[in-house]
Image: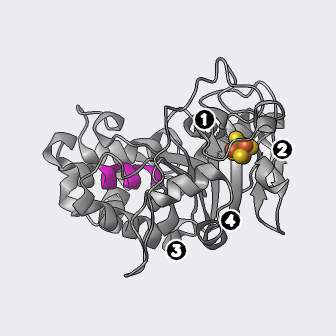
Amino acid sequence: IQAVDGVSLSIQPEQTYGLVGESGCGKTTLAKLILLLEKPTAGNIFFEGRDIGSHDKHELRTYRKSVQAVFQDPFSSLNPRMRVGDLIAEPMIINHILPSRVAKERVGELLGQVGLNPRDASLYPHEFSGGQKQRIAIARALAITPKLVVLDEPISALDISIRAQLMNLLKDLQQRFHLTYLLIAHDLAVVEQLSERMGVMYLGKLVEEADSEELLSHPFHPYTVALLSAILPSRPGERRQQIVLKGEVGSPINPPPGCRFVPRCPKAMPTCSEIEPPLVAVSDSHFLACHLRS
Ligand code: SF4
């Protein structure tokens, strides 16, 4: 199975790259590759200009410290048997960043930075709401001062009422600590709020990529257009007609020939089933894989 196939993208320091697509499109596999949780069968990952495939053990350890993650489900990402203070201190102690006593003092600071009370360090995860648990997960990710944070559906498991607060917190922390984010979400509305640049993935392929403003105002790919039609209008009076795609995302085990979006594309033409559209530039920074513009 090629869960991610020929995807090439770059993330600028201190910016947010938003990666959108339905579940099964390969975005989480891409995150796992970056986090070294899976090995690529081909291709390279460059971090600060260097191929991490050629890193020695020491360099890989440094890389691992520089790249942290916040996952969708704070319920399963936090060990329920550990106190919050120990959970946040653990990465600092394991990575020999601070001695145990100092790390525990730093926990209070981190809890304050994510909007929790330093006294919460003595409690267990089950004593917090979903949004608070995600704040704890963020504090744990920030404990070892990473440069890149992979945010894999960070707010999808939370109540709508607290999503905006979490997004604002992520924005504040990014500015304060000069963080770079890879934000992964199935919902374009989430990604649009934080990202400077966006990529749209479908069945293991990047099908469109552009700066966020450009992508939102001039989407070309029929899949991007459909995703965009599903989000609420950003201005009063703006009207959007929702495009409902038929069927489900196909399987990467046996992708259709030609364009992988063919079975669901409202604009499909005979050539789409025969020739796979390459990702090509439609302007300086806007890339598209669709025969409609080639
Ligand atoms: Fe639709 Fe054809 Fe474009 Fe694929 S290449 S998105 S099937 S129009």
Q: Which residue is mark 4?
A: 13
Q: Amino acid at mark 4?
A: Pro
The x and y percentages for residue 103 are 39, 52
Residue 47 among magenta residues: no
Q: Which residues are magenta?
A: 134-141
Work out which residue is located at the far bottom of the displayed protein and give it. 236
Badge 3 crowding class, 10 Å Cα cut-off, few under 14, some 14 to 19, many 20 or more, is few
Mark identifier at residue 175: 3
Q: Amino acid at mark 3?
A: Gln
Mark closer to the chain start, 4 or 3: 4
Badge 2 crowding class, 10 Å Cα cut-off, few under 14, some 14 to 19, many 20 or more, is some
Badge 4 crowding class, 10 Å Cα cut-off, few under 14, some 14 to 19, many 20 or more, is some
Determine whether, in the image, residue 84 is placed left or right of residue 250.
left
Image quadrant in which you'd find residue 235: bottom left
Residue at 76 percent of width and 63 percent of height: 286
Mark closer to the chain start, 1 or 2: 1
Q: Are marks 4 and 3 in contact (CB under 8 Å)?
A: no
Mark identifier at residue 278: 2
Query: For the stretch drawn in magenta, what is the main secondary structure?
Result: helix
* Structural distance between the alpha carbons of marks 2 and 3: 36 Å
* Camera-side mark, 1 or 3: 1
- Where 113 sits versus 85, above or below? below
Viewer-proximal residue, 261 or 58?
261
Mark identifier at residue 26: 1
The x and y percentages for residue 241 are 45, 62
Q: Is residue 85 visible?
A: yes
* Camera-side mark, 4 or 2: 2
Q: Are marks 2 and 3 in contact (CB under 8 Å)?
A: no
* Camera-side mark, 2 or 3: 2
Mark closer to the chain start, 2 or 3: 3
Determine whether, in the image, residue 105 is placed left or right of residue 264.
left
Viewer-proximal residue, 156 or 35?
156
